[in-house]
Amino acid sequence: MRRIAVLLPLIALAVQAEWWGFRGPGGNGVLELKTLPAEWGESKNIAWKAAIPGKGHSSPILAGGRVFLTTSVEGETIPGKKAVKHVIGGETFVHPQTASEDKRVALHALAVDAASGKILWNHKVYDGDVYDGRHQFNTFASPTPITDGKTVFFYFESQGLYAFDFEGKALWKMSVGGVAKLGLAAGTSPVMAGGVIVLQADEDNGEKSFLYGVSPKNGEIVWKTKRDVSVTYNTPVVVKNGKDDVVVTAATEHVIAYDAASGKELWRGPGIGGYAAASPVSGLGLVFPNSYHPVKKLMAMRVDPKAGERVAWQYEKGTAYVPSPILYGEHLYLMTDSGMLSCLEAKTGKVVYEGKRLPKPGKFTASPVAFDGKLLLTNQDGDTYVVQAGAEHAVLGTNSLGEAVYASPALDGDSIYVRGAQHLYRIRRQ
């Protein structure tokens, strides 16, 4: 009996697989657990919901029994305040959908108790004017936090990177300076690789685009690499080259891989050709960057630095502006912004099915996640469609929260965490 009692906590730890950054392990949105619920609603399988002040499109992350996320609260107008000047092709450019460049903004880092939904701490890390405006749909708290299991790092691009321990003690802060984003605000999340926090800070025309490696111990810049690419809003993906971490970035002009420990460029391939908003995913020795506008394109690119031909195959339809694709098993799934789903063989690009529709039309910004042979597709109305993974397309069910959802879900242990427009939800079998 004693041996069984000792083994039980070990089994529980094996099931617990914490979601430490954007889209979880490897940034790919997959956690192969059979303990997660596939059905929920406003009064079904909701363990708790916690009111979250302000606005943010950052996804929740999970570590140490806590849920971490960010939010922003916009205040009064600052008289005479203007955003940084944007120039494209030698001409001054003002995006028609930019907003709030003249607002005072408070930025917050939060920790929520995963067991109860209680807000454990809520720190205002910044309160003042912003370097650039935001898209009217975006927020100033869209990058997802990252953790190394001991410290949590909250990133607001031009407004700084902030480190806290899990109890809420401020450890350090740093800034890479102002990063002009065409008046649309940040979307890129940090990643952990090669012992550093990697920040992809690409701006307007690329004159001041850089990739940074930042020490998690003290916030010092370990390395800084110039990039000849224009503005990006997506998150890089971390892949392995033997034992080394490689950071692959996708931009309009180039897809570039860097050694995470040094920032040295390892290889580059053709760019995605369009706006860099959706993030790449990886697996099976390939990385899959994609674009939506003005070019619809997805490429399967070989990760091996010694690969002779970088692009293995290419596909030119079915991509999305914001939601990222998902690789699950041998299949790569692409979802449009309206939720139409296509499935390809990841190794070859062979079409399995194309343009499959959901029960009703909707708009999607959350990226898909997957577990136990299922894909979860969550739209802006807060409806999550459970879709069978594999060669046969089938919608297994629809789960509704009754609240708008823009952020990607997080998976952990026996629960799904969904950030709505007003609340954070823990979904668990009851």
Image (cartoon, helix red, strand yellow):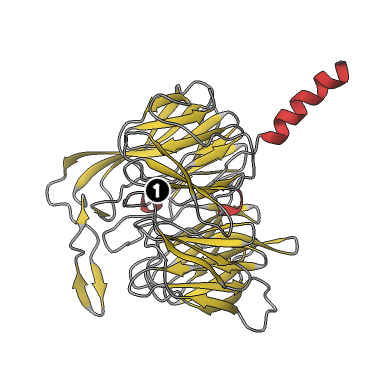
Residue 41 in the image: state x and y as whole percent: 41, 30
Dividing the picture into quarters, in which one does residue 405 lie? top left
Task: Left or right? Give the position of 406 relative to 387.
Answer: left
Residue 398 in the image: state x and y as whole percent: 42, 40
Q: Nearer the viewer, residue 175 or 93?
A: 93
Q: Nearer the viewer, residue 378 or 231?
A: 378
Residue 112 in the image: state x and y as whole percent: 47, 28
| Above or below, comparing residue 110 to residue 241 in the picture | above
Q: Amino acid at mark 1?
A: Phe
Which residue is at the far left? 79
Residue 163 in the image: state x and y as whole percent: 51, 40
Task: Left or right? Give the position of 411 relative to 233.
Answer: right
Task: Left or right? Give the position of 209 relative to 148.
Answer: left
Residue at 23% over, 79% down: 90
Asked whether residue 23 appears in the rendered view, the answer is no
Q: Nearer the viewer, residue 116 or 146?
A: 116
Asked whether residue 113 appears in the rendered view, the answer is yes
Identify the residue position indicated by label 1 in the image.
Answer: 156
Instruction: Give the secondary structure at mark 1.
Output: loop
Q: Nearer the viewer, residue 382 or 305?
A: 382
Specify the quadrant that holds the N terminus. Answer: top right
Residue at 40% over, 24% down: 43
